[in-house]
Image: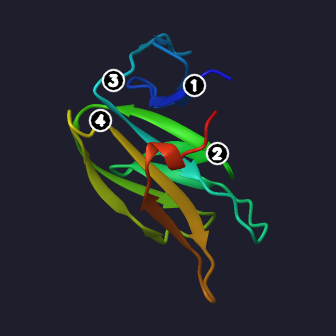
Amino acid sequence: MANLFRIKCPSCGKVIDIPSNTTCSCGSPLVLPEDGMIEVYRIGSPFGAAIGFGVYLNEVPLGHLANTGLVRIPVQYGHYKLHMTQGMSRKCKDVEFDVTPENRIAYFKAHLNMGFFTNTVVIEPSTADQMPKN
C-alpha cells in the first residue's frame, strides 16, 4: 500500500488523499508542502465503538479518520492545533504543537474516552516507533 497524504484543495476545498503532487478534479494543482508532516493514528476501541473521528487542523476540517486508520498531513513549519470530533460530540482534549526544522514530524494517537454522560476524544503525543507500520 502506498503512503497517502491528506491535503485540502486550495480552490474547491475538497479533501483528498494523494500519493504525490497531482491535480484535483476541479483542475487545480495539488502540491504537497515539504516542510513537515503530522501523523495521526485512530486507536481501535476495545468496547466496539468503531466510530471514526473528524479531523480539524487549526479549525480547518480535513475529513474523517476511520477506526484504526492512519492519516498523514503534510504541513509547512508553524504552530498547529489538532482537534478531533466523534459523532455529534465535539468534546476533545486538543493538542497544540509546533512543526519546526528540528521537529519535522509530529506523531499522535487518538482514542475515545467513554464517559457516563458524554465521550471525549483524547489525543496523545506519540513517537515513530509507536505508530503502525503500513
Mark 4 vs mark 2: in front: 4
Please tell me which residue is depicted at 69% across the width and 52% down the height of the picture: 67
Q: How far apart are marks 4 and 1 (CA)?
A: 17 Å
Reading the chain from its start, which is encountered first: label 4 or label 2? 2
Residue picked out by circle 3: 33
Q: Where is residue 80 in the image (x, y as percent from the top left)?
A: 28, 49
Please tell me which residue is depicted at 76% across the width and 72% down the height of the picture: 47
Give the residue type that dot 3 points to: Pro
In the figure, is residue 86 to the left or right of 6? right
Q: Where is residue 35 in the image (x, y as percent from the top left)?
A: 28, 27
Q: Distance between the residues labelled 4 and 2?
A: 21 Å
Q: Distance between the residues labelled 3 and 4?
A: 12 Å
Residue picked out by circle 2: 69
Q: Where is residue 89 in the image (x, y as percent from the top left)?
A: 56, 70
Reading the chain from its start, which is encountered first: label 1 or label 3? 1
- The front one of 21 and 70 is 70
- The front one of 92 and 45 is 45
Give the residue type that dot 1 points to: Asn
In the figure, is residue 95 to the left or right of 114? left
Reading the chain from its start, which is encountered first: label 3 or label 4? 3
Residue picked out by circle 4: 104
Reading the chain from its start, which is encountered first: label 2 or label 1? 1
Residue furthest out toward the front: 129
Residue picked out by circle 1: 3
Q: How crowded is mark 3: few (under 14 residues within 10 Å), some or many (20 or more)?
A: some
Mark 1 vs mark 3: in front: 1
